[in-house]
Amino acid sequence: MDRTAFIQGLPKAELHLHIEGSLEPAMMLDLAGRNGVELPYADIAEVQAAYQFSNLQDFLDLYYAGMGVLRTASDFFALADACFRRVGADNVTHLECFVDPQAHLCRGVRFQDFMQGLNEAARQAAGRGLEVSLILCFLRHLSEREAFGTLEDAEPYHGDFIGVGLDSSELGHPPRKFRNVFAAARDLGFKLTAHAGEEGPAAYIWEALDVLGVERIDHGNRALEDDALVARLRRDQVPLTLCPLSNLKLRVVPDLRAHPLKRMLDQGLLVTVNSDDPAYFGGYVNDNFTRVAQALNLGQTELAAIAANSFKAAFQATEGPDG
Ligand code: ADE
Ligand code: ZN
């Protein structure tokens, strides 16, 4: 069986996908027209041509501008419905999906608008065999006080989220900045995860684990710079949600052949493969598996182990490939 068919056949959980990062250029232009939002692009080719990034911040600037076209509950439904259908087509049966409420609230979009659209799309996805859980992310370039405000604003929707995460500009915004709001979220019963070690140093991964108390690390690429950290991640089997095509586009790695995934697997770390912001980075989860497998020459045993890891790493009790 060829590699692509083998990957397609593996049941998978996707644990690192930002719903706003699934906004495909065609939908961005369509919603911009309908909502009267000005974009600096005339057509899909111009949008795609703009997706050249030298680092995380370059991408985030376009990502926040792009999501400005999302205004109503039906816009969020259209976004999530298209995303969940596309994710399901890759034989993903469980999706834990990040949402950036602060990026919408600051534009005057209300919690009830985006939650209504996202919840309805998730309900319909469940009927097609894709279980979707939402994770509320705090934007780390904002203050902890603002994160607390968002946690409070989210109160009517606490039951709709399984966990909280931490994303946006990493350098200069260490996890410890959010220690109190993560403690509050834990007390409310939320699962905890955080982006760490994407551009930031290994020290941020230690902080995410020991100061925030997260159960999972999003990215974690730079963990390999610190042997004691690798030993800790191995001992506790802390899941890392790796995103190879994101790392390539944001120049976290110069080439997929330099991606740390295989070295991490060889060192006994619990790694998973995910798509991050698929509309911006050139592929959904199977594309990520295929491209990284080609670059690192991963065999079927390794690919099956990575897919099985995704169910071990999931927050929500879920049916893995072995039940
Ligand atoms: N928000 C969306 N994608 C992100 C990423 N890769 N890193 C940090 N914040 C993000
Ligand atoms: Zn991410």
Image: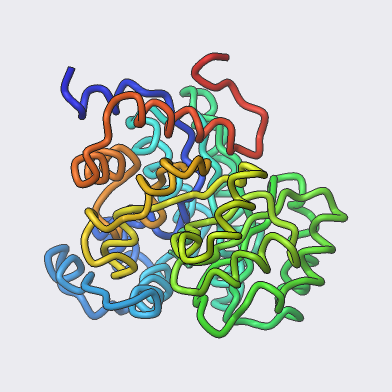
174 over 249 or under it: above or below = below
Tell which residue pokes out farthest to the front in this image.
227
Q: Please give the name of the residue rendered at 40% of the width and 59% of the height, measured from the top-left corner.
A: 21
Q: Nearer the viewer, residue 239 or 184?
A: 239
Q: Please give the name of the residue rendered at 72% of the width and 49% of the height, measured from the top-left corner.
A: 191
182 over 171 or under it: above or below = above
Q: Nearer the viewer, residue 290 or 318?
A: 290
Please state if 259 lies on the left or on the right of 163 as rendered: left
Q: Please give the name of the residue rendered at 47% of the width and 44% of the height, measured from the top-left corner.
A: 267
Q: Position of residue 171 (x, y in %)?
A: 51, 81
Please state if 173 lies on the left or on the right of 88 as rendered: right
Q: Nearer the viewer, residue 61 or 320?
A: 320
Please state if 298 lies on the left or on the right of 135 as rendered: left
Whether residue 309 can be seen here: yes
Whether residue 153 can be seen here: no
Residue 146 figure quarter: bottom right
255 over 102 or under it: above or below = above
Q: Which quarter of the rendered picture does the C terminus lie within?
A: top right
Residue 1 figure quarter: top left
Q: Please give the name of the residue rendered at 66% of the width and 64% of the height, measured from the top-left corner.
A: 208
Tell which residue pokes out farthest to the top in this image.
323
Q: Position of residue 298 (x, y in %)?
A: 27, 35
Q: Position of residue 100 (x, y in %)?
A: 56, 64
Please state if 258 lies on the left or on the right of 205 as rendered: left
Q: Position of residue 158 (x, y in %)?
A: 76, 51
Tell which residue pokes out farthest to the left in this image.
45
Residue 177 figure quarter: bottom right
